[in-house]
Amino acid sequence: MIRVILMLGFVVFALYVLFGNKGESGANTVMGGEFRSLRSCLTNVESSSGFSLDVIVDEPDNVTGYLRGTKRNFACTKKETGTKGVYWDGWYES
């Protein structure tokens, strides 16, 4: 009897992990890349996501917001390292 209860609990948990709590779009993957300019970062996020951008934060080193009509986030943030130099880190939730 205990084995059956444990097995059922595992199956329910596995189904929840696979299909449950995925949010508005059912997706939870983050797509990203590195870009030479803010303009190229924003253009790439917009074209590869297929959505126009609703900008919420518009600062010189950080632009963030939502993909229009969704609750999915995007960001383009200025980064600087010794080996890569200055670049823009861009990502969005797909």
Image (cartoon, rainbow, N blue to C red):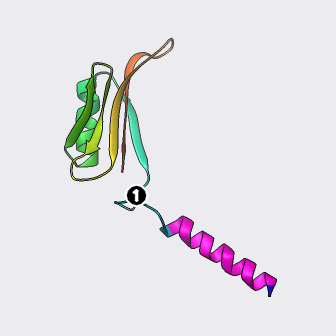
Residue occupied by mark 1: 27
Q: Quadrant of residue 90?
A: top left
Q: Quadrant of residue 66?
A: top left
| Nearer-the-camera pick, 11 or 32 | 11
Give, as a three-letter code, the residue at label 1: Ala
Classify 77 as above or below 93: above
- 1 left or right, relative to 10: right
Q: Which residues are magenta?
A: 2-18
Quadrant in the picture for the N terminus: bottom right
Whether residue 9 is in magenta: the answer is yes
**SS at mark 1?**
loop
Which SS type dominates the magenta stretch? helix
Q: Residue at x 32, y 21 (%)?
A: 36
| Nearer-the-camera pick, 80 or 63 | 63
Classify 69 as above or below 86: below
- Residue 94, x across and y down, in percent: 36, 51
- Residue 8, x across and y down, in percent: 67, 80
Is disc 1 surrounded by few (<14), some (14 to 19) or many (20+) residues within 10 Å? few
- Residue 9, x across and y down, in percent: 67, 76
Whether residue 36 is in magenta: the answer is no
